[in-house]
Amino acid sequence: MLREVESLPGRLSSESLFGNGKPLEIEIGSGKGLFLANAAESNPGHNFVGIEIVAKYASHAAARLARAKVENALMICGNAEPLLDGRIESSSLEAVHVYFPDPWWKKKHRKRRVLNPKSIRNISRVLKSGGRFHFWTDVLDYFEQTVELIAEISPELGVPIPEEEIEAEHDLDYRTHFERRSRKNQIPVYRVRYEQRGP
Ligand SMILES: C[S@@+](CC[C@H](N)C(=O)[O-])C[C@H]1O[C@@H](n2cnc3c(N)ncnc32)[C@H](O)[C@@H]1O
């Protein structure tokens, strides 16, 4: 299913979006939706929401969910940042996933990065105790700066826990399309998970 921001309830939760109380996981920048479809299929006990700002990718991802016939996932077409800032209760999410966010290479454009001080504080705020934040990228500079930033401003996220590369068993057996592309081109991928320690 594809939801436009205007059609969303005021507060985003499993109850308001899916009508049940399952743990909720959110992905920021879902692209073509490979992660979301696989995660929803293999974790029917959780709900998954993908937020993607580019309409054609959001539609592509929603079509993938429809083909997979999953009822525990939906796509939102819109900007994740204001949703994360004002529409999600504190300590309410099981996980936030950010895979291969746009790098914005030029220094003057770095403030456009989806992982910035405000969004990191919000990610930490919305995660419940023990909730996970997964961050993977192939941009070393983005990886290092984000790890440093988290240590500085959100120590309650704990220490970065490395996540293993898993051997692909078939051509789409990757966390996301961008992971697939990087690995096929022998580009190193940096993967971490944080686990919220807060109350
Ligand atoms: C480099 S792509 C990676 C896509 C996917 N995560 C993957 O690994 O294959 C980054 C994605 O984030 C989306 N994006 C960028 N800023 C966003 C924002 N503020 N809110 C939602 N999506 C965003 C882009 O449109 C793009 O699809």
Image (cartoon, rainbow, N blue to C red):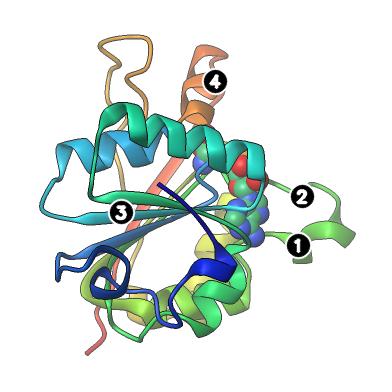
> Mark 2: few, some, or many residues within 10 Å (few <14, many ≥20)?
some
The residue mark sitting in front, 1 or 3, is 3
What's the amino acid at mark 4?
Arg
> Mark 1: few, some, or many residues within 10 Å (few <14, many ≥20)?
few
Q: Position of residue 20 (x, y in %)?
A: 16, 68
Report the front residue among 144 and 95: 95
> Secondary structure beneath disc 2?
loop
> Mark 3: few, some, or many residues within 10 Å (few <14, many ≥20)?
many
Label pair 2/3, CB-CB below 8 angstroms: no
- Left or right: residue 66 versus residue 14 is right
Q: Residue at x 37, y 79 (%)?
A: 126
Report the disc number at residue 112: 1
Residue to which mark 4 is pinned: 181
**Is the CB of the residue bearing disc 4 within 8 angstroms of ligand 1?**
yes
> Secondary structure beneath disc 1?
helix
Q: Position of residue 195 (x, y in %)?
A: 26, 67
Report the disc number at residue 104: 2
Q: Is residue 78 above or below residue 138?
A: below
- Real-space CA distance between mark 4 and mark 1, rounded to the nearest whole angstrom: 23 Å
- Real-space CA distance between mark 2 and mark 3, rounded to the nearest whole angstrom: 27 Å
Report the front residue among 154 and 118: 118
Label pair 2/1, CB-CB below 8 angstroms: yes
Q: Furthest residue to the right?
A: 108
> Mark 4: few, some, or many residues within 10 Å (few <14, many ≥20)?
few
Label pair 3/4, CB-CB below 8 angstroms: no
Q: Position of residue 72 (x, y in %)?
A: 23, 50
Report the disc number at residue 163: none
- Left or right: residue 6 versus residue 183 is right
Residue to which mark 3 is pinned: 48
**Is the CB of the residue bearing disc 1 within 8 angstroms of ligand 1?**
no
Q: Furthest residue to the top?
A: 170
